[in-house]
Structures are given as structure tokens and as C-alpha cells.
């Protein structure tokens, strides 16, 4: 005779310890989409300002139309995030629970941006307007970058924390997160624009011939060597900037069709926009390379479960992307200014770079006995 069944007994929390509160409710798809659109406004203002600095070297004023677009984008983003939190206060019961998942760092980013913006105005009034690479390394501009990065990644953190958003979510459902990822990668690329191959073509035969004409033979050897050092470094860094968001997407979701093209294409077009599309063909090559990466995603279908597919994609995707770039430049300009050993080695290093990033983001599984005693890994 089976033993009598008993109702499930739930243990009460220890005496003196309050019951755990449920997590705050997610912001939702519509709210995340508005946050992403306003973040795009903010980033659009930044790229307008960057375009002005790149094409108007005598710019010597803080009060410009481009700063107005930039800072109004910040005001709209910060105001929307603050309003989204304040309207949930009554229903949530506390300010802490009124902050949707992922939006807390957005609030912190708004505060950092505000302080850095005031400091930036004081810096310009005291020391003038920075130019070229100095503008990207200014302490106040780095503060603005950090604040903006926390703001634009708010929809990504929100979607990441949403348990209802499954791994197989479609393109439309992931649109706020994808937009956020694209903006984050593009913002980081902005800070390294002087190394980004889609911003400036330093590999063509025309660039090499110009160096030979502008410098003496002794000077040319030094400049040529420095150019290759910076160029190869630029390809390695840009590989991380372009494909880092793709790896991040793979860690949480299965990329829907068009996702990689969006992440890579936005960055490539934005990099050329900084020059006023002085060499628009580089943006076209970036879009063609993004299409090649889309094809590799469809064929290999990488995922954290099938590690060999993931590693194969990481080894092949940057090589395919930059091969389109080198091939397009060579065909259009009548040859490359880099020796085959240099551009071939650059292709290999791009694949190795993404493989290394994938190893960090998708480490090998810990054996069970070790896993039982090891500390828990931090939440991504």
C-alpha cells in the first residue's frame, strides 16, 4: 500500500530574515526600442561632431550645431530613462524595485556623462578645442565615452535579463538588443577610428606610391615600417571591434538572419561617414564582407553547444571579411602596397584574434569534481 501523499511543504525563511523580494519587472520590448532609438540619436550627434572635427580642422568653438545634436540626444536619453524609472515608483513600492533590469547602469551612465560634459566645456574654455587623436584621448572625452557606452547598452542588458526572451528569438523581437549591440561596437570603433581600416585605406598601391613621392628613401623606410605596424594593429583591433558584438550575441541568442549584417554594416558605414564618405568604396566593401559573414553563419550555425562550429566560424569569419576588403582594394586600385607576407599574415592574425576572444567568452567546461568546489563564475 503506497504511503499517503502529503502536500508540498515550503520552508519558511529563517527568523529575522525577510523573504526575498521578486526581481523588478522588465522594461519590455517597446520601452527598450525607444531607449535604443534615443541612444542612436545620441550616437548620431557624436558622429556628426566627429565628422565636423575631421573635415573642418579650424573648428574652435564649443557651441556648435553638432554639439547641440549630441547633447540633446543625451538629454533625451537621460530624460527617457529617468522617466521610465519614476513612472514605475508607485507600483513597485520602492525606488530600487522601480529600476527595470539593465537600466541601473544606464542611470549611472547618464550621471557620468553629465559630469563629463560639464568638465568638457570647462576643458575647452581653458585649453581650446582638441584636434585629431588628442581629441579621442582627452580625459573628459573618455568620461563622455564611458557614460555614453553605459547608456547605449541599456537595451542589451534589459533584453539579456528577460527570461521570456528565448535563445531562438527572431530579428524583430531582438531588434532593441541588436541595435544596442551595433551602437556599442560603433561607439568603441569611434574611439579607435585612426586605426580602423574602413576609415582610411593604407593598404593600396596608391598609398604606397604617395609615400615614396613624399619622403626621401631613408624617410620612406621608416614611415613605411611605422605604417605597417599601425596598419596591422588596426586590423587586429578592428576585428575585435567588429566581431566582439557578434560573439556577445552568440553567447545569449542564436543570431537571426540579418543580425551579423546589421552589427558589421552599421559600424562600417559609420566609420566612412566620419570622413564625409571620402572613400565610400571602403564602406561598400565592409557591407560585402558583412554579407560573407552572414553566409558563414548560415552554413556553420555556430553555438555554445557545438564548440567546433563556433571555433570554425571564429577562424573563418574575420578572414572572409578582410579578404573581401583586401581583394576589393586591390582590384579597384590596381594592386596592394603591402607584400603578400604582410596582408596574408594580417588575415591569419584576424582569425587568431577572434579565436582568442571566443576562448575567453566560451571557455572549456570545468570537470565535475572541480566544478563542485570552484567558486561560481560571475554573471555575464
Image (tube, grey):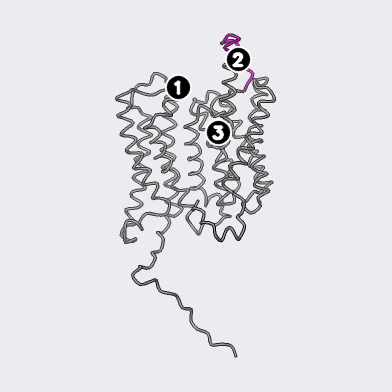
Residue 251 is situated, as x and y percent measured from the top left of the image, at 56, 50
Q: Is 107 above or below relative to 20?
A: above
Instruction: Please report the residue visible at 53 percent of the width from the left and 35 percent of the height from the top.
Output: 267
Magenta residues, dominant SS class: helix
- Please name which of the two marks, 3 or 1, marks the residue nearer to the observer: 3
Residue 230 occupies quadrant: top right
Helix or strand or loop: what does disc 2 sit on?
helix
Q: Name the residue under label 1.
A: 55
Q: Name the residue under label 2.
A: 221
256 sits left or right of 118 in the view: right
Quarter of the image that includes the N terminus: bottom right
Residue 16 occupies quadrant: bottom left
CA distance separating discs 3 and 1? 24 Å
Residue 200 is situated, as x and y percent measured from the top left of the image, at 55, 25
Dot label at residue 10: none
CA distance separating discs 1 and 2? 29 Å
Mark 1 and 2 residues: CB-CB less than 8 Å, in contact?
no
Q: Name the residue under label 3.
A: 237
Count of numbered circles in the view = 3
Q: Which of marks 3 and 1 is nearer the N terminus?
A: 1
CA distance separating discs 3 and 2? 24 Å
Residue closest to the eye, 117 or 78: 117
Instruction: Please report the residue visible at 58 percent of the width from the left and 22 percent of the height from the top.
Output: 202
Single out the residue that lies furthest toward the top. 216
Helix or strand or loop: what does disc 3 sit on?
helix
Residue 266 is situated, as x and y percent measured from the top left of the image, at 53, 37
- Please name which of the two marks, 3 or 2, marks the residue nearer to the observer: 2
Amino acid at each position: 500500500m503506497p504511503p499517503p501523499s502529503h502536500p508540498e511543504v515550503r520552508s519558511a525563511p529563517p527568523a529575522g530574515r525577510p523573504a526575498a523580494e521578486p526581481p523588478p519587472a522588465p522594461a519590455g520590448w517597446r520601452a527598450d526600442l525607444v531607449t535604443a532609438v534615443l541612444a542612436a540619436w545620441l550616437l548620431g550627434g557624436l558622429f556628426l561632431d566627429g565628422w565636423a572635427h575631421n573635415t573642418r580642422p579650424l573648428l574652435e568653438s564649443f557651441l556648435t550645431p553638432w554639439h547641440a545634436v549630441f547633447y540633446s540626444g543625451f538629454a533625451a536619453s537621460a530624460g527617457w530613462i529617468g522617466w521610465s524609472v519614476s513612472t514605475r515608483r508607485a507600483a513597485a513600492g520602492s525606488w530600487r524595485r522601480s529600476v527595470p533590469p539593465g537600466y541601473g547602469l544606464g542611470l549611472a551612465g547618464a550621471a557620468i556623462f553629465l559630469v563629463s560634459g560639464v568638465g568638457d566645456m570647462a576643458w575647452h574654455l581653458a585649453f581650446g578645442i582638441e584636434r585629431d587623436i588628442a581629441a579621442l584621448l582627452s580625459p573628459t572625452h573618455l568620461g563622455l565615452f564611458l557614460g555614453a557606452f553605459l547608456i547605449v547598452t541599456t537595451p542589451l542588458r534589459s533584453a539579456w535579463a528577460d527570461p521570456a526572451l528565448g535563445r531562438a528569438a527572431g530579428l524583430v523581437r531582438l531588434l532593441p538588443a541588436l541595435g544596442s549591440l551595433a551602437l556599442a561596437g560603433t561607439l568603441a570603433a569611434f574611439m579607435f577610428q585612426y586605426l580602423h581600416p574602413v576609415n582610411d585605406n593604407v593598404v593600396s598601391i596608391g598609398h604606397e606610391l604617395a609615400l615614396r613621392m613624399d619622403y626621401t628613401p631613408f624617410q620612406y623606410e621608416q614611415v613605411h615600417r611605422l605604417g605597417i605596424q599601425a596598419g596591422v594593429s588596426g586590423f587586429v583591433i578592428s576585428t575585435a571591434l567588429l566581431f566582439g558584438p557578434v560573439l556577445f550575441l552568440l553567447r545569449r541568442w542564436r543570431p537571426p538572419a540579418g543580425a551579423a549584417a546589421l552589427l558589421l554594416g552599421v559600424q562600417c558605414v559609420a566609420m566612412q561617414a566620419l570622413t564625409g564618405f571620402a572613400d565610400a568604396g571602403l564602406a561598400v566593401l565592409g557591407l560585402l564582407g558583412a554579407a560573407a559573414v552572414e553566409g558563414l553563419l548560415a552554413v556553420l550555425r555556430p553555438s555554445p553547444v557545438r564548440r567546433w562550429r563556433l571555433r570554425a566560424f571564429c577562424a573563418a569569419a574575420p578572414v572572409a571579411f578582410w579578404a573581401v576588403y583586401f581583394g576589393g582594394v586591390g582590384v579597384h586600385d590596381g594592386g596592394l602596397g603591402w607584400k603578400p607576407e604582410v596582408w596574408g599574415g594580417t588575415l591569419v592574425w584576424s582569425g587568431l584574434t577572434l579565436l582568442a576572444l571566443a576562448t575567453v567568452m566560451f571557455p572549456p567546461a570545468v570537470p565535475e569534481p572541480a566544478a563542485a568546489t570552484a567558486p561560481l563564475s560571475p554573471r555575464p
